[in-house]
Image (tube, rainbow, N blue to C red):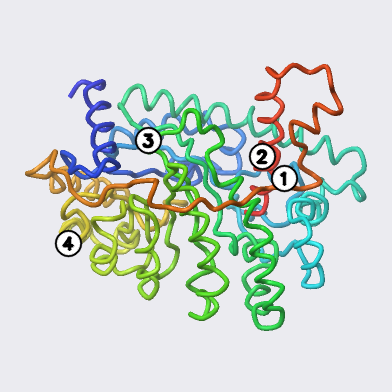
């Protein structure tokens, strides 16, 4: 098929999924991380982080071999070019180059009151510098500003070849991906439990400081709503969605989930839906016992999954939500090619029924040991052949109406966040036309600091 026609077919298939229409076939979303590509190519991954051009030949070889509707070459989720520049203790490189998350925390239990008073100020002044040592103005005076600039410059210069390669791949193979302008972030409680207090710290805090935890979730919700909304609503379409990792919920007792995790998340997603924005999440771990809650989230939300039972997920969420991924990566590494093909057909017999599903894995391919390429090739080709519908164009599922949802009424304020009025007070001769530039920079810094909580 001509590459332009293939691109248009892929675009139409994805848009049909998001429009509640059965597509021509199940979309195939497969990608291989840069670390894994380096290993497949016999290149030291530590070198590939800084010189992605070395991966180009192998990336094209993989694209020839593995059919996918999305670019087969993925990015490094955690890249040392950034985290080394800011002196991160939370994201460190192992001896083989793999980026790891040591068990760190940025906030002590005695600091809840300070956090509750102004979450963003606490994050900027204490939390982020505490774990990213180069950003600490006390320990690293003067150079703390340089560290931010260095991280930005190195990430852009070292990462630019990656973007060039991906564009070449897109142009040659007709890969399709809508610009992800949908925003995304955390469930409010996951901000606290990820790096601020850590999982283990939060489980202790729920028992010892329950009221403080509840107040902190409430306090951080306006900030979280702000960073989770699309950065530029003017160019937003519902073919994009805000992406979240759901971290803490499945490790909590039911009563703790119901009181501390769920209400703030539901308010946030319904508020975003009232503005017409679509949200989506990766259901980490096993959500079998919590799917009745997920059913209550806005129509058309997008969920990828890990260990949740596919039959249960499809029965609970099919027709209302868009579903994706979930195919166990173990079938690519631990099974024969023939067994992997059989498992693919069994999986599609569950997930692809009545549309609303995009094929992908339950985990990313992060290293070569995750995946035998002959299995991945066979699975991808099986989805293309077996996942064809005999009733494309049929309207299915529920329709989304933003009027069905209540605004969240969450206003972000902080002494560390300069509004346009405050900027004008300091710079009274500035024309109104400067506002988009000034506020885009201010808002980008908010997202950058919150992003360092990952």
- Residue 204: percent from left, percent from top: 67, 79
Image height of 153 relative to 295, above or below: above
Q: What secondary structure is marked by label 2?
A: helix
- Residue 220: percent from left, percent from top: 67, 58
Q: Residue at x 47, y 72 (%)?
A: 250
Q: Residue at x 69, y 46 (%)?
A: 83
Q: Tag 3 or tag 4, which sits nearer the N-term?
A: 3
Q: Which residue matches tag 4? A: 346
Q: What distance separates the C-alpha of mark 4 from that of mark 2?
A: 42 Å
Q: Residues within 10 Å of mark 4 (few under 14, many from 20)?
A: few
Q: Which residue matches tag 3? A: 71
Q: What distance separates the C-alpha of mark 4 from that of mark 3?
A: 25 Å
Q: Quadrant of the C terminus?
A: bottom right
Q: Which mark is residue 81?
A: 2
Q: Which mark is residue 84?
A: 1
Q: Tag 1 or tag 4, which sits nearer the N-term?
A: 1
Q: What distance separates the C-alpha of mark 2 from that of mark 1?
A: 6 Å
**Nearer the observer, 252 or 263:** 263
């Amino acid at each position: 098929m001509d590459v332009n026609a293939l691109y248009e077919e892929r675009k139409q298939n994805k848009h049909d999924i998001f429009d509640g229409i059965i597509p021509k076939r199940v979309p195939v979303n497969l990608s291989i991380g840069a670390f894994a590509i380096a290993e497949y190519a016999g290149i030291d991954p530590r070198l590939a982080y800084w010189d992605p051009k070395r991966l180009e030949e192998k990336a094209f070889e993989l694209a020839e071999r593995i059919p996918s509707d999305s670019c087969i070459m993925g990015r490094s989720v955690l890249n040392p070019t950034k985290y080394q520049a800011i002196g991160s203790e939370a994201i460190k490189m192992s001896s083989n180059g793999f980026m790891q998350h040591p068990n760190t925390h940025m906030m002590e239990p005695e600091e809840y009151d300070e956090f509750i008073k102004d979450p963003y100020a606490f994050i900027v002044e204490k939390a982020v510098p505490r774990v990213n040592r180069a950003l600490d103005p006390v320990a690293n005076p003067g150079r703390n500003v340089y560290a931010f600039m260095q991280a930005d410059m190195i990430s852009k210069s070292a990462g630019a070849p990656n973007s060039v390669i991906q564009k070449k791949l897109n142009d040659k193979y007709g890969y399709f991906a809508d610009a992800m302008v949908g925003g995304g972030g955390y469930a409010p409680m996951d901000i606290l439990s990820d790096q601020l207090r850590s999982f283990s710290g939060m489980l202790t805090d729920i028992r010892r400081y329950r009221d403080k935890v509840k107040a902190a979730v409430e306090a951080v919700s306006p900030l979280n709503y702000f960073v989770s909304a699309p950065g530029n609503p003017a160019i937003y379409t519902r073919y994009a969605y805000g992406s979240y990792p759901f971290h803490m919920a499945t490790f909590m007792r039911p009563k703790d989930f119901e009181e501390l995790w769920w209400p703030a998340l539901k308010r946030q997603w319904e508020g975003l839906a009232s503005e017409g924005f679509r949200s989506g999440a990766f259901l980490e771990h096993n959500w079998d016992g919590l799917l009745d809650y997920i059913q209550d989230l806005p129509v058309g939300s997008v969920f990828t999954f890990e260990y949740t039972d596919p039959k249960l997920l499809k029965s609970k969420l099919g027709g209302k939500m868009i579903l994706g991924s979930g195919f166990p990566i173990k079938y690519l590494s631990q099974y024969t090619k023939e067994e992997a093909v059989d498992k693919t057909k069994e999986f599609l017999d569950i997930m692809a029924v009545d549309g609303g599903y995009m094929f992908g894995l339950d985990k990313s391919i992060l290293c070569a040991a995750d995946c035998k390429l002959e299995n991945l090739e066979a699975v991808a080709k099986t989805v293309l052949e077996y996942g064809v519908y005999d009733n494309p164009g049929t309207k299915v599922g529920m329709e989304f109406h933003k009027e069905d949802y209540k605004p969240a009424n969450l206003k972000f304020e902080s002494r560390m966040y300069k509004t346009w009025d405050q900027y004008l007070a300091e710079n009274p001769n500035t024309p109104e036309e400067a506002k988009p530039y000034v506020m885009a920079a201010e808002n980008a810094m908010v997202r950058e600091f919150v992003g360092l909580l990952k």
